[in-house]
Amino acid sequence: MTSQSKRETVLNTALEAVTKDRNANYGDPEDNFLDIARLWTAYKPDTTFTRTDVAVMMVLVKIARAYTSPTLLDHWTDLAGYAACAYGCSVADNEDAE
């Protein structure tokens, strides 16, 4: 498998995950991450988390896991997916602030 085809595999798998597979189980990422942000805020009330915070922290979780097992495709696929979700969350958070 070439480097380019490996990159395509990661991005195509991430695209499937954030637009189809997981949406059926968890709903839209922006809504799910907002629910998570509210739960995290309830758990630590001195901090107000946003859905963008959730997406960024999920990226950091995957980076920590990739450090431990850098050749596991799942980490890189999830990073790409969380990055896409983070963008959608940041747009939604910005619209909420207006």
Image (spheres, rainbow, N blue to C red):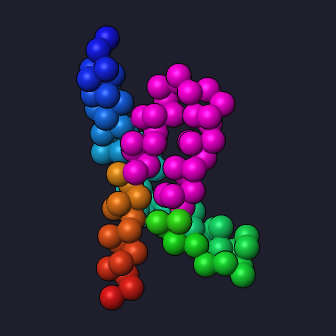
Q: Can see residue 59?
A: yes
- Picture residue at 38% right of the left edge, 54% below the top: 85
Say above or below: 64 vs 73.
below
Chief secondary structure of the magenta span?
Answer: helix
| Residue 35 position in % (x across, y down) | 53, 66
Whether residue 82 appears in magenta in the rendering, the answer is yes
Q: Residue furthest top?
A: 1
- Picture residue at 71% right of the left edge, 79% below the top: 45
Q: Can see residue 24?
A: no
* Left or right of 28 in this view: 41: right
Residue 81, quarter of the rendered image: top left
* Left or right of 2 in this view: 47: right
Say above or below: 45 vs 86.
below
| Residue 49 position in % (x across, y down) | 58, 73
* Left or right of 86 in this view: 60: right
| Residue 2 position in % (x across, y down) | 29, 14
Range shown magenta: 54-83
Q: Residue furthest bottom?
A: 98
| Residue 82 position in % (x across, y down) | 44, 49
The image quadrant where one finds the N terminus is top left
